[in-house]
């Protein structure tokens, strides 16, 4: 293995560990205690889209989230419903 490949592998390892740690932290703060970690990571990705739309003042609709994440709209709708049930996301008209 060349030095560049080793550095790239280490960088990927750091990035992967960071992503997992971030997801665990978010799960611990926002998910209900009965919700096992990892069973609904899609839900958090949908929540990230809602947060992004809110931060950029361009709210996402379910269809827009589905397109953005390359995910079926029905899946996005179910995930949005979970986030609403957890009082994390609120719907305003067609947007979240």
Image (tube, rainbow, N blue to C red):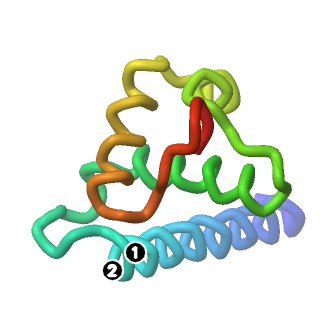
Q: Position of residue 61 (x, y in %)?
A: 62, 31
Total of numbered circles in the picture? 2
Could you classify mark 1 by the number of other residues whose Cα lies within 10 Å: few (under 14), some (14-19), or many (20 or more)? some
| Residue highlighted by disc 2 | 28
Q: What secondary structure is found at the residue carrying circle 1? A: helix
Q: Quadrant of residue 25?
A: bottom left
Could you classify mark 2 by the number of other residues whose Cα lies within 10 Å: few (under 14), some (14-19), or many (20 or more)? some
Q: What secondary structure is found at the residue carrying circle 2? A: helix
Tell me the quadrant of the picture where the C terminus can be found.
Answer: top right
The residue at the point 45 percent across, 74 percent down is: 26
Q: Position of residue 40 (x, y in %)?
A: 31, 49
Q: Which of 14 and 5 is in front in this view?
A: 14
The residue at the point 35 percent across, 64 percent down is: 87
Q: In which quarter of the image is residue 55?
A: bottom right
Classify 17 as above or below 60: below
| Residue highlighted by disc 1 | 24
Classify 46 as above or below 38: above
């Amino acid at each position: 293995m060349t030095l560049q490949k080793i550095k790239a592998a280490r960088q990927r390892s750091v990035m992967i560990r960071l992503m997992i740690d971030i997801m665990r932290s978010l799960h611990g703060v926002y998910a209900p205690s009965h919700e096992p970690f990892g069973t609904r990571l899609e839900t958090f990705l949908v929540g990230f889209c809602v947060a992004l739309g809110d931060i950029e003042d361009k709210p996402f609709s379910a269809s827009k989230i589905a397109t953005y994440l390359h995910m079926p709209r029905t899946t996005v709708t179910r995930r949005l419903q979970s986030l609403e049930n957890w009082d994390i996301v609120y719907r305003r008209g067609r947007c979240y």
